[in-house]
Amino acid sequence: MRFLIAGAGIGGLTAALCLAKDGHQVVLLEQSQAFSEVGAGLQCGANAMKVLQYLGLDQALRNNAVEPQAIHFREHDSGNILYQVPLGERYQRQYQAPYYHIHRADLQAALLEQAKALPNIQIQLGAQLVSFSENETSVTLKLSNGESIAGDCLIGADGVRSQVREQLLGTNSARFTGNVAWRAMVPMSALPNDFMPALTTNFVGPSKHIVMYYVRAKQMLNIVGVVEGRTENSTSWVQKAPWQDFYDDFAGWHPMVTQAINVVNKDQCYRWALYDHPPLVKWGSNRVTLLGDAAHATLPFMASGAAMAIEDARILQRCVAENSALKEDVQIKEALSLYQRNRSSRTAYVQKTSAKLGKLYHINNRYLQRAAFAGLKLIGPSKEAYLPSYDANTVALN
């Protein structure tokens, strides 16, 4: 079959590789004129890594990844540890795959290199989707350059402001959450060798939090800070913002935080508005579906946006294969229906839980926050397996 994928981000590339692995023809459409390196890190747990291992990318990623030993939640000023989650070898033994910190560009480059090497994947840059139409036998895309492309199925992997979702649902359901995110990268040459062990360190405080971890074989420190109450601004990952605003947002926080921000390149600070949308009742039509943020944009407090898109891709592939014995005119319809049934509840849970965790991280009262994290120590361990124990390669489809 011939699949058309709108969006060549992490989810779109993973979906292309998964479908191509089963022999399908894939046309991957990316509206940007070139693939650019976005300076941001990703946390890839076992659930995402199992899919990437299935695609044969484990070694390529391992060369540049960092395997953290734990996640630490710390008070914003004192640095006292409120809660911690063990990772490292213990995590890998328990879930049969590692937990990696990966530079987004490294993951995209590994996916892209493999996609370019496959004859049944065609990549078109500068291909902006204007509209699509479908009938009983095909779906046809109209691009901004006037070109029309036809295929058997359209996958909207085009992000939180998805054009595919907007046409499917009649409106763009993305909503500003009242949060903005700062993003910066610091070369380790600018920091002391003993700045921080290989951890995910999350400082939480009144109406904001900041996460730091290493990427690129511990050569770079990734910094992401989320602040409530700022006005809406660009959703672009490459929108620069004043360094002084970044510093002022976290002035008075723990010395590790201010030390890291102090050495950020003042011309390399990025800030963007965080959007999500309510869990969707409908993901598609007979020949069109959504994937990744287009289907279930979520706040970053569970660090699982990319992982959910990667899971989507593998489950979609399996759903198509599951219905391969059906007549072609109903195969896609049944496959897409099965795909939504097997993804909607899990991704909705992540959307809702991420929002709740954001409220926990941003509690304004120190003592209430300590009490909340004390409660998490009681219930957290029973919930920590929810993400990594999921195996998109083997989970039963129903």
Image (spheres, grey):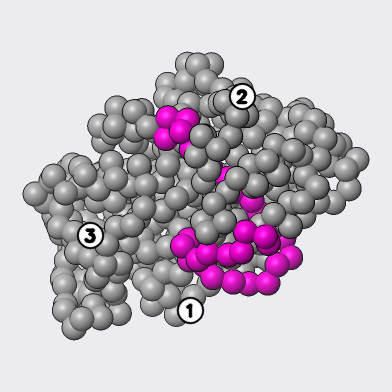
Task: Look at the image and say whether residue 211 sits in the magenta stretch.
Answer: no
The secondary structure that most of the magenta stretch takes on is loop
In this rendering, position of residue 147 left or right of residue 382: left
Q: Which of marks 3 and 2 is nearer the N terminus?
A: 3
Q: How crowded is mark 1: few (under 14 residues within 10 Å), some or many (20 or more)?
A: few
In this rendering, position of residue 6 left or right of residue 261: left
x, y (%) of residue 177? Answer: 65, 65
**Is 397 or 78 nearer to us in this picture?**
78
**Is 289 or 357 nearer to us in this picture?**
357
Q: Which quadrant, please, contains the N terminus?
A: bottom left
**Which amino acid, mark 3?**
Leu
Please, is residue 309 above or below residue 141 in the view? above
**Which amino acid, mark 2?**
Asp
Q: Determine the residue positioned at 58% across, 65% down.
A: 241
Instruction: Please state the extent of the stretch shown in magenta in the rendering.
Output: 216-245
* Quadrant of residue 279 within the rendered picture: bottom right
Residue 217 seen in this snapshot? yes
Please, is residue 231 above or below residue 183 in the view? below
**Which amino acid, mark 1?**
Thr
Secondary structure of the residue carrying tag 2 is: loop
